Image (cartoon, helix red, strand yellow):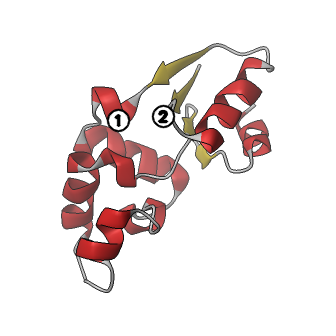
Amino acid sequence: MLTIYHNPKCRKSRAGLDYLKTKNVEFTVVEYIKEGISIKDLKEILLRLNKKAEDIVRTHEEMYKKELKNKKFTQEEWLKILVDNPKLIQRPLVVGKHKAVLAQPPEEINTLL
């Protein structure tokens, strides 16, 4: 079973969801901006992505540019920033049992199948 962390307002996220629907797999959708995301879940996703929190930050967001750019944060601080501001998380993130991908382009999902 896969899980897609999705923002319906995002074109890239919708493309990832549409691509996932064409595959014959079960998946769940988490609208993480509306529902929120826990630090525990984010840590697990990052572990499966083999990335650090700062690696999945949307650096073109206004909040990032005004408040975060060129500042140094610890991993725990980044986790808190992302949990408190989920709009800063790149999307869509698709999570499998042992691995996760940033589905940009959507075909990245194939590595989980």
What residue is rendered at 63% in x and 32% in y?
14
Q: Residues within 10 Å of mark 2 (few under 14, many from 20)?
A: many
Residue receiving disc 2: 7
The mark nearer the N terminus, 1 or 2, is 2
Q: Which mark is residue 33?
A: 1
Residue 104 at x, y = what percent? 68, 50
* Residue reaching furthest to the bottom: 70
Residue 45 at x, y = what percent? 44, 44
Residue 111 at x, y = what percent? 75, 42
Residue 32 at x, y = what percent? 37, 33
Query: Do the CB atoms of the residues marked 1 and 2 lie less than 8 Å apart?
Result: yes
Q: Is residue 63 left or right of residue 21?
A: left
Q: Is residue 113 left or right of residue 69?
A: right
Judge whether residue 98 can be spotted in this image. no
Q: Quadrant of residue 24?
A: top right
SS category of the residue bearing label 1: helix
What residue is rendered at 79% in x and 42% in y?
107
Q: 46 or 31, which is in the foreground?
A: 31
Q: Residues within 10 Å of mark 1 (few under 14, many from 20)?
A: some
Q: Which mark is residue 49?
A: none
